[in-house]
Structures are given as structure tokens and as C-alpha cells.
Image (cartoon, grey):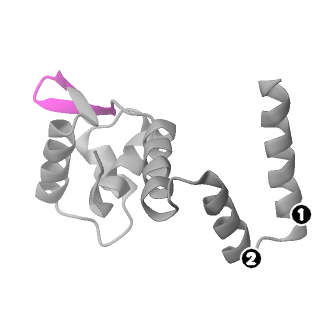
Amino acid sequence: MKLSRAEEELMNHLWKLKRAFMKDLLDAYDEPKPATTTISTLLKRMQEKEFVSYEANGKLREYYPLVTKESYFSKHLKGLIKNFFNDSPAQFASFFTKKTELSEEELLGLKRIIEDQLNQKK
């Protein structure tokens, strides 16, 4: 399941904070801050999607993520590769390296990462 852009922004704040009350989440936003009701609505939808849960502390709720950032991004990236690159990681890599205007140093860094992964699979 995918998050909306507003939900992703809120989720990024929650991933960074790890656990947060409503006040903490609002404080994480730049001005102009969203309304408390907006954040409440987003949190409720994210709970329904099983991305977020909370623990009650008196009248307050302390929210925490149920999904890691890495897990969410991995699923999102796999969907992107499947839907836009014919399920071909090679097509994605080709597009990424050509269209992002990476420097030689950045490309060499990617090459080292790939070589490390290949060595781990041996």
C-alpha cells in the first residue's frame, strides 16, 4: 500500500523522531504548520493502512511507525521498477545513471557498492 505525499511527509517526521506526540509532530513541520486536525486525519488514515500505531498515555497518544523507512522505500522502488522499467533493474540503473548527471566519483561509488554486493553473493 502506498502513502499520499502528505502522509509520506508526516511519516518522514515520525521515522526521524521514532516516537512522537501530536505536539512533537507539529513542531517537526516548517511554517506554515498544518492544522492539528489535518495531522490527526493523516494519522488515522495511516493507522488504517497499518503504517502507524500509538500507545495511550493518559489523554495523549504517542505515535510510532510500524514500517521502517527502508522497507517502505524498498517496496516503493520495486513497484517503480516493475511499472516504469518493465520489471528490469538494469533498465532502471541505466536510466538512473544517465539522467541524474552523476559525477565520475559518484558513479565509481555506485560501482563499488555493486562490486561489494556481488562479492557478498559469492
Q: Position of residue 112 (x, y in %)?
A: 87, 46
Q: Of the residues shown, which amino acid type is indicated by label 2?
A: Glu
- Dominant SS in magenta: strand
- Residues at marks 1 and 2, CA–CA distance in whole angstroms: 11 Å
For the residues labelled 1 and 2, say whether their Cβ atoms are less than 8 Å apart: no
Residue 105, numbered circle = 1
Within-10-Å neighbours for mark 1: few <14, some 14–19, many 20+: few
Query: Can you tell which quarter of the image residue 7 is in?
Result: bottom left
Q: Which residue is labeled 2 in the image?
A: 101
- Report helix, strand or loop for mark 1: helix
> Which residues are the magenta region?
55-65
- Report helix, strand or loop for mark 2: loop
Residue 85, numbered circle = none
Q: Of the residues shown, which amino acid type is indicated by label 1?
A: Glu
> Looking at the picture, does residue 102 appear above or below residue 122?
below
* Image quarter (top left, top right, bottom left or bottom right) of the N terminus: top left
> Looking at the picture, does residue 53 appear above or below residue 98?
above
Q: Position of residue 81 (x, y in %)?
A: 51, 55
In this view of the protein, which residue sits in the foreground, 96 or 27?
A: 96
Residue located 14% across and 38% down the image: 48
Q: Is residue 63 magenta?
A: yes
Q: Position of residue 29 (x, y in %)?
A: 36, 60
> Looking at the picture, does residue 37 appear above or below residue 98?
above
Residue located 80% across and 44% down the image: 113
Left-right relation of 105 to 30: right
Residue located 79% across and 44% down the image: 114
Q: Position of residue 11 (x, y in %)?
A: 35, 47
* Image quarter (top left, top right, bottom left or bottom right) of the C terminus: top right
